[in-house]
Amino acid sequence: MKFREIISMALQSLGANKLRSGLTMIGITIGVFSVISVMTAIGALQ
């Protein structure tokens, strides 16, 4: 498979599963924010 075909298939899959994709992005965002918040809080306590 060519790189363009792979990208095209990935974008079609994202478009077909909009809710799942959106919820996944929200989950990743919340997870990253949580890790950053905890690291900041630990740094502030020291």
Image (spheres, rainbow, N blue to C red):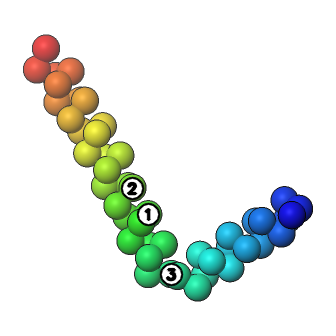
Q: Are marks 3 and 2 in contact (CB under 8 Å)?
A: no
Q: Position of residue 30 (x, y in %)?
A: 31, 55
Check disc 2 and report its element: helix, strand or loop: helix
Of 19 and 9, which appears nearest the observer? 9
Viewer-proximal residue among 1 and 8? 1
Cα–Cα gap, marks 1 and 3: 11 Å
Q: Residue at x 52, y 82 (%)?
A: 17
**Nearer-N-terminus badge (3/2):** 3
Name the outermost residue toward the front. Answer: 1
Between 24 and 2, the one nearer to me in the picture = 2
Earlier along the polypeptide chain: callout 1 or callout 3?
3
Front residue of 19 and 45: 19
Q: Which residue is mark 3?
A: 18
Q: Residues within 10 Å of mark 3 (few under 14, many from 20)?
A: few
Q: Quadrant of the N terminus?
A: bottom right
Instruction: Look at the numbered discs 1 and 2 and tell me whether their residues touch, using CB distance below 8 Å.
Output: yes
Q: Where residue 44 sits: x, y (%)? A: 16, 22
User: Quarter of the image holding residue 5?
Assistant: bottom right
* Three-letter residue code for mark 3: Lys
- Seen at 58% across and 85% down, the residue is 16
Q: Give the residue drawn at x 76%, y 65%.
A: 7
* Numbered circle sitting on residue 25: 1
| Distance of label 1 from label 2 (alpha carbons) | 5 Å
Amino acid type shown at disc 2: Ile
Please name the amino acid that badge 1 sits on.
Answer: Met
Name the disc covering residue 28, or none.
2
Horizontally, is 37 left or right of 3 in the view?
left
Q: Quadrant of the C terminus?
A: top left
Estimate how packed mark 1 is, as few (under 14), some (14 to 19) or many (20 or more) residues with alpha carbons within 10 Å. Answer: few
